[in-house]
Every structure is written in C-alpha cells, then in structure tokens.
C-alpha cells in the first residue's frame, strides 16, 4: 500500500477528473444490490480512479458511493465513501465519535500509519439525505468535470421547483 | 417474554433494536466492521409458524464486500458457498441468514457476526494483494527448488550501476544466467534496460525473465522485453513447471 500523506490524499480527492469510462445508463441488480461504476482520470493525466455505486435493494437508504485510487503497479485504495443511513458508525482514529445517520468515510494518514482500515474515519454530513443528493455531492467534492453529461437524471431541474420547497 | 426481551437479557442489556421496516428490526450491538461501521444484523420472524427468528443481513455483507472485491467467478463463488456451508449460514439473492429458536438467538447472533467478518475478509484474496506475493513466491521457489544451481540474490553485474540489479544469478558455465522477476510494466522496463546495458558492456550472460502475467503487458513492453531477453516465462506457474528442465539444458 502506498504511504499516502494527508496532503496527497486531499489532493487526489479534489483534483479535477475527467470520465474515461462512463457509467451504465441504468444500474444492474445483482445479489440484493443495485450497482454501477465509472472510471476517471485526473485532468493532468497522472492518476486514475474508479467510482463504485451501490444501493441495497431492500433498503434504499443503505447506499455507498466510493472513490478508489488506482496507482499503477500498486495496491488500490479507497479514498472516500459517501454512505447513506445504514446505522451506527464508530470512529477509531482521529477521534472516538459515534455517528448515527448519513456520513462520509475518509481515508486518513492517521489510519494508514496505524495500519487500520483506510477509510476508518467518518464525518456526519447534512449535505445529502437521499441517494440522488449524495451522488451529486460526491461528484462535486471529487471534482468530476461535466458530471451532468454522465448522470443527466440527477441534474435535471424539476419542472415546478424543488419538492417541498417554498415555491 | 418476547424474543427481543430475551435477546436483550442474553446480551446483558448491551443491545438495542431499531425498527427498519415493519416486521424487520435492526440489531444495535457493539459489533463493528474494520471501517468502523456497525455490522448489519436484522431480525425478523419468518411468519411460517416455526417459532424461529431469522438473523440476516439483507445482502449488506456482500454489498460491502463488493466495494473492493467481487465474487464474480465460479471459483470465488465456490469459496463463498463453502464458507457459508461450513458455518451453517444460508444465502438467498445475497441475503445471508440463520434461523434460530429464540432461546438460541444469542449464540446465533454471535455466530452470524463471525460469518459476516469471514465473508468480509474475502477482500484479502483480491488479485492486487495476492500479486504482492509474486516476488516472495518466486524467491521461495528459487531458494528451495533450484539450490543446485547456486542462486545468488540481488546481484550487481556492473558494480558502478547499483540501479541495475539482477534478482537472481545462477552460476552455470559457460555463462551465468541473470534472472529477473517482473510483476508489472515498471519492472519489465527495468529488466529491458538492464539487459541492454549488460549487453552494451559485453558481459557474458544469458537473461531469463519470469513474468507475473505476460499477457497483460502492453504490446510495446512485450516487444521490447522479447527483443532484449534470452528466455521468458509467461507466468510463475510456467517457471515452476519448466525451470529445472531449461536450466538442465543450459548446464549440459
């Protein structure tokens, strides 16, 4: 496993990325989950990434959208995962917070140095509640260029404004 | 006493329950995955009048496993089926489950959590981790099976070029054999450069390359190493099967 520094991890998450293998138009159902994925390359061409998207078929609030770094000739590493509300998460590095609800897992240098599961640390978020919101948020924080070209269904404006909105 | 009260008592009040869907409870217990997420355990009464409670995961274990590892070949599926069968856990469209009478629920939950951990650890079988063993396996084979050829390890044929290292040297007359293990394109390119440099310095040697998987190399890398090396083995298995015979011919 590469010895990432926190600075490298943050840079890999935030660098602009272009889609080199688009997602399937529709998710496929398999073994109780719906799944999709795509491949990305950093705009400078230096790094490649895989995105995995999973939604549990029985509980649609149990989803995970993750970014995996694919260094050439080295073991790949999940950099972050946007999780739905599957239950409780217990941090074991950085802090000992217990999170109940949607949260984002981040790979940290601290977890790497402790030899723990990389994305052990998680933070609660109010950035999303549904899978669609989570996917939009995920594509924004990992800096995918023109995500609307590949996920038009989550970028279409509602005809009569936001559901539950004021107008 | 309800099965939830019974289970709570069995766990000394260290567990709780959350209604996930009508008739489906999520067990809140201090049982965690390596990433800190609580293990997904659900409890439901099958409604078949059998008096049992189903302990299950609603396919969450295989979903989590798929973040880094897919059970997508007959061999992987066979391993998974054996693991579940040996631990008396059933599977239906990804849903892992055990049916247990309420009085045995405590043991069933602990057993189920163990199986979830075992299935989750299948991620350690992934190719990129197993591939990390390539050089160790090559070294083990050379040191155990090819001892009669006096293998030397980490040889520098050009002492002033410590960047051009040969993994193993076999002292075979009239020319020694330099052997390179090559797991990826970076190592293939280094082996190519090393062979060409040794040739340029007119060193007497023959070069062997053992690939982790020759077929997956880019075409240009295949061409370059084929031009530079004297003999290649397309995989570690190929080397294991043929190394002794080839070295015997070289030594004859």
Image (cartoon, rainbow, N blue to C red):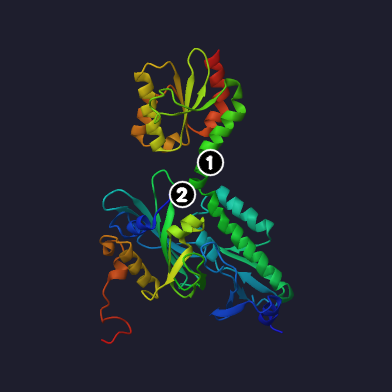
- Image mark 1: chain: B
Q: Which residue is mark 1?
A: B133
Asked whether, in this view, residue B134 is left or right of residue B193, the answer is right
Where the N terminus of chain B falls, by quadrant? bottom right
Write the residue at 51% across / 57% down: A114
Quadrant of the rendered image containing residue B56 = bottom right
Residue A83 visible in image = no
Q: Residue furthest front?
A: B160
Disc 1/disc 2 C-alpha distance (Å): 13 Å
Label 1 Cα neighbours within 10 Å, binned few <14 / some 14-19 / many ≥20: few
Label 2 Cα neighbours within 10 Å, binned few <14 / some 14-19 / many ≥20: few
Question: Do tags 1 and 2 sit on the same chain?
Answer: no
Asked whether, in this view, residue A70 is left or right of residue B148, the answer is left
Q: Position of residue A155 (x, y in %)?
A: 28, 70
Closer-to-camera residue (A22/A42): A42
Closer-to-camera residue (A133/B135): B135
Q: At numbered mark 2, what does the secondary structure look like: helix, strand or loop? A: loop
Closer-to-camera residue (A108/A164): A108
Q: Which residue is mark 2?
A: A1
Write the residue at 34% across / 69% down: A137
Q: Is residue B108 above or below residue B49?
A: above
- Image mark 2: chain: A
Where the C terminus of chain B falls, by quadrant? top right
Q: Position of residue B185 (x, y in %)?
A: 39, 37
Q: Is residue B227 above or below residue B48?
A: above
């Amino acid at each position: 496993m590469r010895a990432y520094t926190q600075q490298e991890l943050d840079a890999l998450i935030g660098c602009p990325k272009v889609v080199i293998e688009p997602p399937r138009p529709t998710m496929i159902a398999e073994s109780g989950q719906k799944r999709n994925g795509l491949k990305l390359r950093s705009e400078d061409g230096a790094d490649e990434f895989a995105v995995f998207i999973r939604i549990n078929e029985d509980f649609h609030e149990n989803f995970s959208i993750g970014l995996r770094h694919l260094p050439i000739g080295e073991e790949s590493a999940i950099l972050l995962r946007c999780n739905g509300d599957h239950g409780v998460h217990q941090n074991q590095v950085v802090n000992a917070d217990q999170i109940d609800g949607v949260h984002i897992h981040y790979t940290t240098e601290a977890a790497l140095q402790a030899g723990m599961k990389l994305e052990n640390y998680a933070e609660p978020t109010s950035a999303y509640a549904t899978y669609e919101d989570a996917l939009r948020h995920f594509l924004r924080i990992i800096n995918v260029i023109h995500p609307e070209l590949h996920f038009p269904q989550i970028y279409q404006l509602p005809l009569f404004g936001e559901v539950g909105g004021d107008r | 006493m309800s099965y939830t009260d019974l289970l709570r008592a069995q766990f000394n009040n260290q567990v709780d329950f959350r209604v996930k869907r009508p008739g489906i409870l999520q067990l809140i217990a201090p049982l965690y995955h390596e990433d800190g997420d609580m293990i997904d355990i659900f409890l439901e009464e099958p409604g078949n009048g059998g008096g049992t409670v189903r302990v299950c995961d609603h396919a969450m274990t295989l979903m989590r496993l798929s973040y880094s590892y897919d059970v997508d070949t007959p061999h992987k599926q066979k391993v998974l089926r054996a693991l579940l069968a040996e631990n008396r856990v059933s599977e239906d469209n990804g849903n892992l489950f055990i049916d247990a009478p309420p009085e045995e629920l405590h043991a069933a939950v602990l057993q189920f959590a163990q199986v979830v951990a075992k299935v989750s650890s299948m991620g350690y079988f992934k190719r990129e981790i197993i591939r990390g063993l390539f050089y160790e396996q090559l070294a083990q084979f050379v040191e155990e099976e090819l001892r009669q050829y006096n293998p030397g390890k980490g040889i520098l044929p050009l002492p002033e070029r410590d960047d051009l290292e040969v993994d193993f040297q076999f002292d075979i007359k009239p020319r020694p054999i330099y052997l390179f293990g090559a797991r990826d394109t970076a190592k293939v390119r280094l082996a190519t450069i090393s062979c060409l440099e040794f040739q340029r310095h007119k060193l007497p040697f023959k070069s062997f390359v053992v690939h982790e998987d020759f077929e997956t190399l880019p075409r240009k890398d295949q061409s370059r190493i084929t031009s530079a090396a004297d003999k290649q083995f397309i995989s570690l298995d190929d080397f294991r099967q043929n190394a002794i015979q080839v070295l015997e011919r070289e030594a004859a």
